[in-house]
């Protein structure tokens, strides 16, 4: 059973819960890193929780906030995280295949439920293509520009 880490701030809470139910029905094991209500909160703490788990377990995660931008910025501060803010299925597919993304970011105020389901499916069902893309992804490492 594939594990998927989920986390959201208050703006992404409802979509996170909907995604969690949907993914559970599809047979995924969900690891929920919060938030656990729609009470106002700070998105970085939830991005960091999820990224620390994904970073140490080389698994995949989905982060949700209002626009997806804040979560993406917070997630990409982690050395082993390649977070991609995706608004289409093609973005998600290419993020995985070409960029070896391990965290998907979604904007709950921008992305409807059905589209979110499709984007998450594209993200989870694709794998890194390697090859010429591996050379480029290796250049994303924090010490690569030194």
Image (cartoon, rainbow, N blue to C red):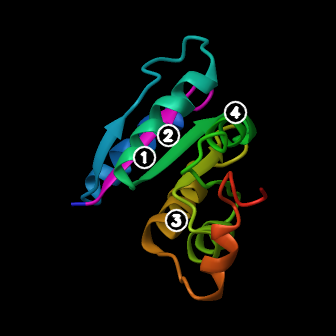
- Locate residue 50, reporting x and y percent: 46, 37
Q: Residue under label 3, please give it.
A: 123
Disc nearest the viewer among 4 and 2? 2
Residue 65 counted in the magenta span: no
Please report whichever mark, 4 or 2, sits nearer to the chain's N-terminal start: 2
SS category of the residue bearing label 3: helix
Mark 2 lies on residue: 51
Mark 2 packing: few (<14 Cα in 10 Å), some, or many (20+)? Answer: many
| Cα distance in 3D space between marks 2 and 1 | 5 Å
**Residue 43 in which image quadrant:** top right
For mark 1, what is the residue?
Answer: 54
**Image quadrant where one finds the C terminus:** bottom right
Q: Which mark is residue 66?
A: 4
Tell whether 114 sits left or right of 106.
left
Residue 22 spot, x, y in % from top left: 37, 51
Q: Say if the magenta span includes residue 10.
A: yes
Magenta residues (range) = 2-13
Q: Secondary structure at mark 1?
A: helix
Give the spatial CA distance, label 4 vs label 1: 22 Å
Q: Secondary structure at mark 4?
A: loop
- For marks 4 and 3, the one nearer the N-term is 4
């Amino acid at each position: 059973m594939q594990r998927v880490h989920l986390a959201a701030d208050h703006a992404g809470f409802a979509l996170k819960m909907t995604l969690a139910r949907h993914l559970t029905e599809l047979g995924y094991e969900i690891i929920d890193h919060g938030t656990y209500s729609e009470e106002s909160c700070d998105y970085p703490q939830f991005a960091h929780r999820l990224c620390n788990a994904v970073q140490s377990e080389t698994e995949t995660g989905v982060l949700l906030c209002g626009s997806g931008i804040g979560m993406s910025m917070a997630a990409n501060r982690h050395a082993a995280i390649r977070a991609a803010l995706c608004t289409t299925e093609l973005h998600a597919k290419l993020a995985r295949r070409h960029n070896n993304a391990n965290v998907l970011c979604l904007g709950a105020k921008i992305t409807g439920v059905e589209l979110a389901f499709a984007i998450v499916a594209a993200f989870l069902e694709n794998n890194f293509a390697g090859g010429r893309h591996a050379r480029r992804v290796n250049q994303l490492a924090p010490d690569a520009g030194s």
